[in-house]
Amino acid sequence: MSEDNERELIDRAQAGEAVAFERLAEQHAARLWRCALALGKDGHWAEDLAQETLVEAWRSLARFDSRCKFSTWLYGILRHRFLKGRPNQKAARHSSPDALGQVPCTAHTPSRSAEASEDAGRIRRAVASLPEAHRLVVELRFFAGATLDEIAAALGCPLGTVKSRLHHALEKLRQMNLEVNLFTSTGESRDSKP
Amino acid sequence: MNDLRHNCELWAEPISLLAAGCLSTDEERDVRRHFETCPDCRERFGQLTQLCGALAEAQLPVNVAENAIVERVMSAVASEESRRPLDRPQAEMIQPSPLTRSRNRWRWIMRSPVSRIAAVAIVVLAVGVAMFFQGGGGTAFAFTDFVAPILKAKTTKCKMIIETKGPPVQTLTSEVMTLDGARVRQVTELPDKSKVVMIQDWSQGKSLTLLPASKTATVLTSSSNRKDKTPENGGFFVFFRLFQHVAEDKPGIEHESLGEKEIDGRKVVGFHIISQPHDLIMWGDPKTGLPVRVEITSGIEGSVKATLSDFVFNVDMDESLFSLEPPAGYTVRKGKTDDSPKEEKDLIEMFREYSKLSDGAFPDSLDFLTTSTSFGKKAGLRMSIQKMWEDLAPGKRKPNEEQMRKLEKLMLKLAEGKLNKEQTQEIAEQIKEYIETQTQNTAEVGETQETEGFRQAQFNEVFRRVQRGLNFANKLPPSADAHYVGKGVSFGAADTPIFWYRPKDSQNYRVIYADLSVRDSDTPPNVSKGQPVSAPSRPKE
């Protein structure tokens, strides 16, 4: 969706047009869900958080003033709902298995699904082993597709911090990969396989 | 990022961010310039790029979650919208997408299974109850004082609530404005929270009905030459007639005082005017001499009740509110009110249409209001089911009779409004599952061409036929010795009479049988429990 299209949808939604808001929700729901999945415990909880975020966005739409991107604003709401609804989230998080590591990946085609699933599983486990602050930025960037601004809004920290965390997280993963090959089938070598 | 070729540490973070796709074009250019002179950073970048590609591929598919989230969000949004005040102008302008329309319809059906089209008809019909009020009056008393302001006011504004008994129970609220005693504007909130605006000017014999949600306007002009062009079901204006009857204080009306009580903190006195099967209760403020609340109950066992309250008299009103010109952008339909004489064949058509909708059963009575309302609800329920079916199984064949009856039963459970949220959801799921099961292995028959306008025209035509038939029976004079015995009888038996009457100037009876054949007879059928069709349950001539 182009920025102009999104701007038009936002204007219409702010005027009370539910259909326009539905289009916006369709546009952002998946990324919000992934973001929630990175923050939370399981898929159902993440669905609830993404839903609460969008409903709250509808209620607060009049206050959106375009000073940031709409998606960044949504990530801010998501963080707010996350902190409000889950005061003991950190403890809960630590006591539960990693959400992303639990969910089976089905994005690949059957011909390479087994190998790709193995790679994906290894990568997600590697990410899960990172310190919390680093894990979050990686999951938000790569699993939720969030921009740096959106990650900053979701985590409530400065942009510079996000950049720094992402860099250090990637560097750790790179080192891990040099020690233990995480993705045997990634890149050109995998693509060239039948 | 100028000349930093020998300080690779400073390039480390930008390189990571570039691999992660987080740098602007200018920043990327600087980093790539550094690569030209630094093979180590170039190699690190290659490793990071491979890593980031693998991370991106490890992303989870989200189709199911995404759809479920949007569905639930929009359900919550609609639920909140339905609780917002109705004076939000843009709400009328929303043109829902097919998806939203489907969801809204689903929620709307759960709120009230009578379609908007049928609901509009019932609004018009229900306020016509006063037509059946048998005029007359006994003693001059304060009651007439409370009627006078309504009749004499330059302008009147009030709230009107129409309640109809089930199935399904239905309550509709309107804001009514009158001007010069001849022009009426009535805005009614329908079960799906949309509105219908009816503007009538019976000095011209003309009315305009607007449905802002679908932007349709219907202009009706009376074809009657009578001075009083008020049609038989002429909306709110018929109340004026009722009040005129009362104010004229003619003999024949039973009345009783109801004493005093408090309404909204005001002491009021009440009067009960009885003319079976129609009751009118009026509460007025003895200090101001103004009416406070009027309740009119009509139909068999009080099947329809209209309550008028919140009266305001002689306030300034913009005449444009009563304009009979359709607004720009509306699709306009024009027609004439049905003033042609009603005939026996109209009654037979009514029996046919009613029995088709009722598993063959004929109506319990020929009471105009009760039977019209009941028919309107049955037809509305079916229209709602058809729309729901088309939403859930687009392009599939229409439901057959058995499927329709199964769904009617489920919908009526919802309509009674006695279920809690979980039970309601459970029934809604049963309906959805039933339609999906019934249609999953059936062939596509193509998209339906039945627009809402088409359905409305279809409904109006059938409803008109039913009303004509009922009018014919109810307008027969006592000398016609008309009787109805169709209660409990189903369509089919050629030897079971359901209705008979003696036409004007005829010695023979016309007898209609359960197969809807008609035969002449010297004598009325020998049926002991005949239900006379006579005053007061028929319209005033």
Image: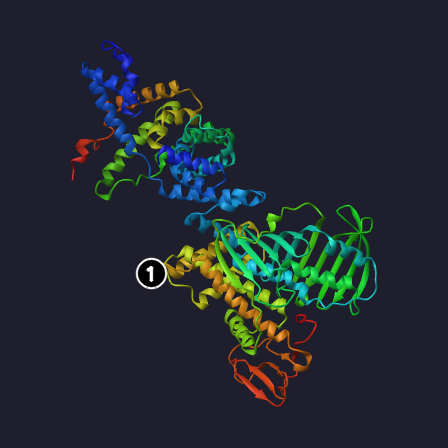
Q: Is residue B105 above or below residue A41?
A: below
Residue at image location 61% in from the left, 90% down from the top: B522
Report helix, strand or loop for mark 1: loop
Using the image as rendered, state which of residue B540 and residue B121 is in the foreground.
Answer: B540
Q: According to the image, label 1 marks what residue?
A: B444
- Is residue B153 found left or right of B230 in the rendered image? right
* Image position of B108 (left or right of B369): left
Q: Amino acid at mark 1?
A: Glu
Q: Could you say where residue B183 lies in the image, as x and y percent from the top left?
A: 64, 55
Q: Is residue B361 above or below residue A41?
A: below
* Colour convention of the picture: rainbow
The image quadrant where one finds the N terminus of chain B is top left
Residue at image point 23% right, 11% down = B5
Q: How packed is label 1: few (under 14 Cα within 10 Å), some, or many (20 or more)?
A: few
Chain identifier of the residue bearing label 1 in the image: B
Q: Position of residue B221 (x, y in %)?
A: 56, 62
B384 or B218, which is in the foreground?
A: B218
